[in-house]
Amino acid sequence: MSAESVTLMKQAVAQAAAQEVKSGMVVGLGTGSTTAFVIQFLGERLKSGELSNIVGIPTSFQASVLAKLYGIPLVTLDDVERIDIAIDGADEVDPDKVLIKGGGAAHTREKIVDGLAEEFLVVVDSSKLVTELGSTFPVPVEVLPLALSPVTRALTNLGGEPVLRMGVKKDGPVITDQGNMVIDVKFATIHDPAELEKTINNIPGVVENGLFVGLATRIFVGELVNDQPVVREIK
Ligand SMILES: O=C(CO)[C@H](O)[C@H](O)COP(=O)(O)O
């Protein structure tokens, strides 16, 4: 599929998701190329007066920069008692609505914000739908730098193939917004994602992993039908 087609699907699903936000809502702002469009569309709705009085909670430096660019007022978790809706992307979505996230190394803050939201709306293009979790994407694990070696060994002992994520246009590893590193772990199969999520997080030095189990409430999928972008919701 061409890059243009994927962009069309991302824009369509982002537009549909942005319509789910109502005036006065506290909105979790996800990270990635799909949610970048969501933030843009929310900003446009605010500017046109169609939407008013929303505030955003960013899940990353990227989300915060985009929100400021598009005029969405930002607050922190200290300022609000609830998050009405969080809209975020994913790297894989399985039939049970279990996700792998963290392609942008933002899964730690994403899990906090998305997990607190009354509604967590996932926005993906159809390429992210998988029948077997972990078949196309490794599980990202954020780790404190001092614990890199023991955590890597522990992940190997769990049956994974850990690879330290390296920067692009930057020598050395990717550094997260929290100042940590990311190990991408490929598992041959993931039989019990809930158990694996807990087991990985139980390794001393692990901050958070990208398995999102039981958090997504709605999934919007953008796809192309007869070359036209359409959006469907997975029930
Ligand atoms: O989890 C994420 C960032 O940590 C992203 O939501 C995920 O990687 C999907 O990104 P994109 O919309 O660019 O495909």
Image: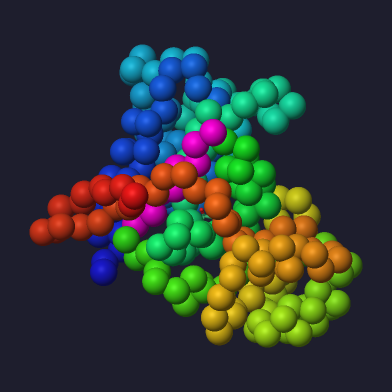
Give the main secondary structure of the magenta stretch: strand
Q: Residue at x 64, y 76 (%)?
A: 185
- Provide residue 107's location: percent of width, then percent of height: 62, 54
Rendered position, 226 above or below 66: below
Q: Residue at x 69, y 75 (%)?
A: 164
- Where residue 202 sits, quadrant-wise, is bottom right
Rendered position, 205 above or below 55: below
29 displayed left or right of 35:
right
Q: How many numbered marks, from 0 up?
A: 0
Q: Residue furthest left?
A: 226
Which sits in the foreground, 4 or 94? 94
- Provide residue 189's location: percent of width, then percent of height: 54, 81
33 displayed left or right of 76:
left
- Provide residue 21's location: percent of width, then percent of height: 41, 28
Q: Quadrant of the N terminus?
A: bottom left
Q: Residue furthest right?
A: 146
* Residue 12 visible here: yes
Please say whether residue 121 is one of the residues in the magenta stretch.
yes
Please say whether residue 66 is one of the residues in the magenta stretch.
no
Rendered position, 7 above or below 43: below
- Provide residue 84's location: percent of width, then percent of height: 53, 28
Q: From which residue to which does the magenta span run?
A: 118-125
- Where residue 198 sits, quadrant-wise, is bottom right
Q: Residue at x 80, y 82 (%)?
A: 153
Colour logic: rainbow
97 displayed left or right of 60:
left
Rendered position, 42 above or below 169: above
* Residue 145 visible here: no
